[in-house]
Image: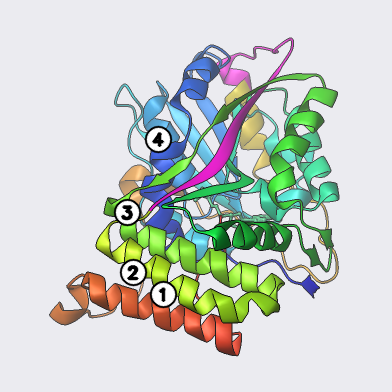
Amino acid sequence: MVSEPVRAGSDWLALREPADAAARSVELVEELLSFLPEGRLVVHDLGCGTGSMARWLAPRLAGPQHWVLHDRDAALLHRVGLTPPPVSSDGVEVTVETRRGDITRLEPVGLAGASLVTASALLDMMTAEELGRFVDVCAQAVCPVLVTLSVVGRVQLTPTDPFDRVVMNAFNAHQGRDISGGRLLGSDAARAAVAGFTARGLDVTVRPSPWRLAPKLSELMAEWFTGWLGAATEQRPDLREAAVPYARRRLDEAADGSLSVTVHHEDLLAVPRSPSRRSPAAVWTAANRTSSTSAYASPPADTSTSSASAPTTRGRSPGPPGLQQTSQAELLPPTGAERRRTHLAAITATLLWSVKPCWATFE
Ligand SMILES: C[S@@+](CC[C@H](N)C(=O)[O-])C[C@H]1O[C@@H](n2cnc3c(N)ncnc32)[C@H](O)[C@@H]1O
């Protein structure tokens, strides 16, 4: 099967953000602190989406910080300014700029002067070749690299159901499917990244970062489940008939609070063996210089990328353009029964008519 990479929807990213925040390894951040230089930090977040990593990590780091958020999706980058990261752990303002481009074609100059490179929920969307380039460019930045929330291909649903494993295997195969640029690494990506960083002379520490979706996160659970099953049945259409009653059972359990789900992930911290400590001035100068340089290699013919930079700061967020009027009824949260109906309708559409779901990544 050959398909294009799916886009991550902002609604999906917003829904998962609290679970992501609870899952990322704080232990690795504590370890990271000793590898950061004094003074102003320049942090590059690759595949930033709407900026969830910056919102989570910036308040855990001290002192002035400048975040450079990279993504290929202009709509997601636009949303960074709507919810910028809060202040640092000691109350200092955090500044942010966005850069649009394909991070697998990022040139080393694009990370020049970085004090830290981060990425979150990203690696499984890469092919082996893309991951190799990603690891290369990160290693050449000669600074710590924190990569969080890489799927590892294991999920646990409680209570268990014999069909869980069948779906999990089909989902994992979907994660590792062929796309036009090669085969996605899916749940092999985390291990491949550890091997890649180690081979390039970095020390790597890995920590678990599971999503624990308890009944209070039932909306996320139902969305995740619907996407998980939808991807599995896209991979294995022969599972569709059995998937309908299975979906009904599981969504009933999600709605009545009797289902809990653990989606296993891993975080990694890679640090150069002999970290080169640069002066804060050198860090800032180098970062300034790169903003006028092309940070990305020429894109392949079928990829539209640009390195346009849209600076935003915490105090000067642009605000949502063209805010639409929302009625009171639209503001009321849907009831559990309404949500369950919506999910069931979505999954039935996905299963029976191969309708693409509105969410895009299923990890
Ligand atoms: C699952 S989302 C995670 C977003 C964000 N890191 C977070 O934790 O919420 C993956 C993000 O990576 C971006 N992405 C994937 N491949 C990319 C590439 N080759 N170049 C730039 N961005 C990429 C997608 O547009 C999307 O925003």
Q: Amino acid at mark 1?
A: Arg
Q: Amino acid at mark 3?
A: Leu
Circles 4, 2 touching at the beta carbon (< 8 Å): no
Q: Nearer the viewer, mark 4 or mark 3?
A: 3
- Ligand 1 within 8 Å of the CB at mark 2: no
Mark 2 or mark 3, earlier in chain: 3
Between marks 2 and 1, how big is the CA–CA gap?
A: 6 Å
Between marks 2 and 3, how big is the CA–CA gap?
A: 14 Å
Q: Where does label 3 land, which residue?
A: 217
Residue located 68% across and 50% down the image: 124
Viewer-closest of 351 and 150: 351
Between marks 1 and 4, how big is the CA–CA gap?
A: 45 Å
Q: Nearer the viewer, mark 1 or mark 4?
A: 1
Circles 2, 3 touching at the beta carbon (< 8 Å): no
Q: Taking 290 as reference, is 161 left or right?
A: left
Between marks 4 and 2, how big is the CA–CA gap?
A: 43 Å
Mark 4 or mark 2, earlier in chain: 4
User: Which segment is the magenta one?
Assistant: 260-282
Q: Is residue 271 magenta?
A: yes
Disc 4 secondary structure class: strand
The picture places residue 66, in percent across and down from the top left corner, at: 49, 34
Colour theme: rainbow
Quadrant into which the N terminus falls: bottom right
Q: Where does label 2 land, which residue?
A: 252
Q: Amino acid at mark 2?
A: Asp
Q: Quadrant of residue 138?
A: top right
Q: Where does label 4 land, which residue?
A: 94
- Give the numbered dot on residue 110: none
Q: Nearer the viewer, mark 2 or mark 3?
A: 2
Quadrant into which the C terminus falls: bottom right
Circles 3, 1 touching at the beta carbon (< 8 Å): no
Q: Where does label 1 land, which residue?
A: 248
